[in-house]
Image (cartoon, helix red, strand yellow):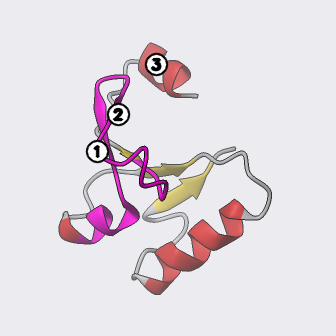
Amino acid sequence: FARVIEQAGLAISRFLDIDPNKIGNTLRGAPVVPPEHLCDDPRDEPILVVVGVKGARDLIREWLDSHGFTEPRDYVCVA
């Protein structure tokens, strides 16, 4: 999915993950950070939620909603 975003001429500023083995790495030139990183930044970038694990989308929605994010104003689930 990242490739499609980049082909559309958009830049990915970061990837969020909960896996400690992935956090701190880079993916397609962007850092992989924990979800809490979203709380430190102004909400001026759209958040695209792309997950492939069953049930993960609901968990992500719950986390975002509980931290003051609102769908679709602040984030959109795309896959």
What numbered label is drawn on residue 24? 1
Which residues fall within the magenta stretch? 16-39
What numbered label is drawn on residue 41? none
Question: What percent of the width, then of the height, locates residue 48?
Answer: 50, 48
What numbered label is drawn on residue 12? 2
What is the CA distance from the residue labelled 2 to the residue labelled 1? 16 Å
Q: Is residue 25 magenta?
A: yes
Mark 1 element type: loop
Against 24, is 4 above or below? above
What numbered label is drawn on residue 8? 3
Q: Label 2 is placed on what type of residue?
A: Ile
Left or right side of 59 for 36: left
Marks 2 and 1: which is nearer the front?
Answer: 1
Q: Label 3 is placed on what type of residue?
A: Ala
Q: Residue at x 49, y 54 (%)?
A: 19
Q: Residue furthest right?
A: 54
Left or right side of 44 for 68: right
Mark 2 element type: loop
Quarter the C terminus occupies: top right
